[in-house]
Image (tube, grey):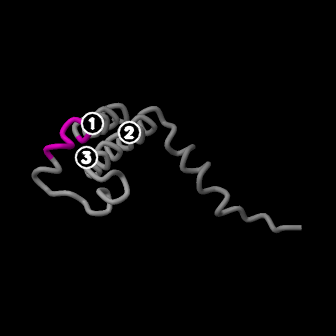
Amino acid sequence: MRFFLGLIGIAAGFLLIWQANWIVVNFGKTAWAEMHLGTEGGSRIMWKLIGLGVIILAMLYMFGFIEGVIWAIFSPLFNRSQPQ
């Protein structure tokens, strides 16, 4: 099941990257992305970066690494040892 959901996530990320122009044409530009990611085409770059992030997260989930990554990122926030 994990492998199947990972493949669906990879396909969704690929579609976000492949159809970034279609998304921008049909749903409009994002002002923040246009301002911070480029003067022309910033929204397309944003959708492509989101797609790449979806692919990376799907692969981490598919191979069972996402729990380790989340633990490594957030474990310092929940460290219960007292400073000496």
Q: CA distance from mark 1 to mark 2?
A: 8 Å
For disc 1, the marked residue is 8
Q: Is 80 left, or right, of 63 in this rendering? A: right
Q: Position of residue 50 (x, y in %)?
A: 33, 47
Query: Which numbered dot is residue 48?
Result: none
Dots 1, 2 in contact, CB < 8 A: yes
The disc, 1 or 2, on the residue closer to the chain's N-terminal end is: 1
Quadrant assignment for the C terminus: bottom right
Number of marks in the image? 3
Q: Residue at x 46, y 32 (%)?
A: 63
The disc, 3 or 2, on the residue closer to the chain's N-terminal end is: 3
- Amino acid at dot 1: Ile
Q: Give, as a single range, the part of the protein colored magenta.
A: 16-22
- Amino acid at dot 3: Arg
For disc 2, the marked residue is 58
Q: CA distance from mark 3 to mark 1?
A: 22 Å
- In front: mark 3 or mark 1? 3
Residue at disc 1, secondary structure: helix
Q: Is 46 left, or right, of 20 in this rendering? A: right
For disc 3, the marked residue is 44
Judging depth in this view, the residue of 56 and 79 nearest the camera is 56
Residue at disc 3, secondary structure: helix
Q: Position of residue 26 (x, y in %)?
A: 10, 52
Residue at disc 2, secondary structure: helix
Answer few, some or many: residues within 10 Å of disc 1's Cα (few below 14, many 20 plus, some between 14 and 19). Answer: some
Give the answer, above or below, for where 15 lies relative to 35. above
Q: Main secondary structure of the magenta part?
A: helix
Give the answer, above or below, for where 21 lies relative to 73. above
Q: Residue furthest right?
A: 84
Q: Residue at x 33, y 60 (%)?
A: 35
